[in-house]
Image (spheres, helix red, strand yellow):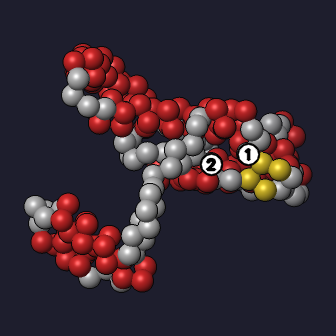
Amino acid sequence: MTRKSPEAIVKSLLDMLAGFPSIFLDVIQHSDLPTVTLAPLMFRVPWDLLLNDMYKDNITVAGDAMHPTTPDLGQGGCSSLEDAVVLARHIGNSFILNGKIDSRALKGYVKERRFRACLLITLSYLSGRVQQGGSGRFMKFLRDRVFYKFFALLAGNVVNHDCGKLPSMLLTSEERNTKKLE
């Protein structure tokens, strides 16, 4: 991708969105030019998550650093919030059980998020590929006869995700003794 000036980016956007309501165009026209940049959409191959450690000692990644996705499922922000809840749960449990944050908390967080993040990356990519993949006969068949019939069911299951309950410091000593850190 060639580097474009902020002025060229704004002009390009205004040209592309010429038919949009003026309220949207006003936002673009009044952008603070020194802050306008253009970056390519990045794709992370899902097997990176499966095959590599996403933590070391007391450091891990979350959100787009762990699982950048194309915008086709609309789950990027949601999955980042899920990361926050799951990470907080693992850290909270570690603190309650050990009085400190144990590295096993991060290991448990990564283990729990790994497959869901892979699923989101893959489904988002496939969704975009099928919807924007052209108008050939095969792609039309795939999109109309397969994708739209089955994808809605799968996507519905993906967006309804329970991150679990956050820990409470109000555990009884018996509850603390029976709880195990993964």
Q: Is residue 92 visible?
A: yes
Residue sitting at x 36%, y 83%: 32
Dot 2: element = loop
**Residue 118, x across and y down, in percent:** 57, 34
Q: Amino acid at mark 2?
A: Met
Name which of mark 1 and mark 2 comes first in the sequence. Answer: 1
Would you place residue 41 above or below residue 15 in this image? above
**Residue 173, x across and y down, in percent:** 85, 47
Q: What's the CA distance linking mark 1 and mark 2?
A: 7 Å
Q: How many marks?
A: 2
* In this picture, residue 157 sits left or right of residue 52: left
**Residue 42, x across and y down, in percent:** 50, 50
Would you place residue 48 above or below residue 147 in this image? below
| Label ID, residue 66 | 2
Residue sitting at x 44%, y 36%: 125
| Label ID, residue 80 | none
User: Front-most of 18 and 98?
Assistant: 18
Residue sitting at x 23%, y 79%: 29
Residue lying farthest front?
Answer: 2
Q: Is residue 167 visible?
A: no
**Residue 67, x across and y down, in percent:** 57, 46
- How packed mark 2 is, by other alpha carbons closer than 10 Å (few <14, some 14-19, many 20 or more), is many
Q: Amino acid at mark 1?
A: Met
Quadrant in the picture for the N terminus: bottom left
Residue sitting at x 26%, y 82%: 30
| Label ID, residue 54 | 1
- How packed mark 1 is, by other alpha carbons closer than 10 Å (few <14, some 14-19, many 20 or more), is many
Q: Are marks 1 and 2 in contact (CB under 8 Å)?
A: yes
